[in-house]
Image (cartoon, rainbow, N blue to C red):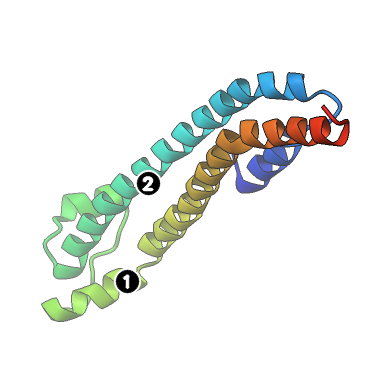
Amino acid sequence: MNFEQIRSLVGSDMKIDSSELDVESLRTPQLHNKYLNIFHDERLILKKLNVDYAELKKAKWEYYTGKMSLEELKERDWEPFQFKILKTDVDRYLDADKDLVYIRNKIMYQEEKVEYLASVLKSISSRQWDIKNAIEWRKFINGV
């Protein structure tokens, strides 16, 4: 699920129908469950991306330091690295490697989704409070 789909879903789900506060109150557990499931799925994707990044970073380190075998190079469809670089410079190559940058960008995007979903869950948790306040305000306005 991409970020726009999640935001659109949240936009429609988080609306509170003020004419049916009792129904809205009863919807809260279902909403919490729905977004908790999405949150966990997205967090698992983030964890998988972090593992993929670590594995690729190790392979790229072996590649740039010349420790990768020809079989591994052929398996990954990589050309042998042509230069001999200092150990202190390997991080520069790793930081600029397009494959690693691509995964880092995916991780950052995924982290934003997970953070957003965490805040949605927090908002859903406070939804009951918002509904209770609306009910109390109506009682006050009606002199009850």
What residue occupies the far front of the structure in this picture? 143
What residue sits right under mark 1 in the picture? 95
Q: Residues within 10 Å of mark 2 (few under 14, many from 20)?
A: some
Left or right: 115 as drawn, with respect to 49 = right
Image spot of residue 20 (x, y percent) = 82, 23
Q: Marks 1/2: CA distance?
A: 17 Å
Rendered position, 60 above or below 93: above
Rendered position, 18 above or below 77: above
Label 2 element class:
helix
Image spot of residue 118 (x, y percent) = 50, 43
Q: Residues within 10 Å of mark 1 (few under 14, many from 20)?
A: few
Label 1 element class:
helix
Examine the rendering and report whether any part of residue 138 can be seen.
Answer: yes
Image spot of residue 97 (x, y percent) = 35, 68
Kindly identify the amino acid type of the residue bearing the numbered disc 2.
Answer: Leu
Left or right: 104 as drawn, with respect to 61 = right
Which residue is at a point 56% across and 34% down the rendered structure image? 125
Quadrant of the drawing holding the N terminus? top right
Q: Quadrant of residue 9?
A: top right
Among the two numbered marks 1 and 2 on one chain, the one whose residue lies closer to the N terminus:
2
Left or right: 33 as drawn, with respect to 50 = right
Kindly identify the amino acid type of the residue bearing the numbered disc 1.
Answer: Asp
Examine the rendering and report whether any part of residue 17 can be seen.
Answer: no
Which residue is at a point 73% across and 24% down the rendered structure image? 24
Q: Nearer the viewer, residue 106 or 99?
A: 106
Q: Quadrant of residue 21?
A: top right
Image spot of residue 57 (x, y percent) = 25, 58
Label 1 close to label 2 by CB (< 8 Å): no
Which residue is at a point 62% across and 27% down the rendered structure image? 31
What residue sits right under mark 2 in the picture? 49
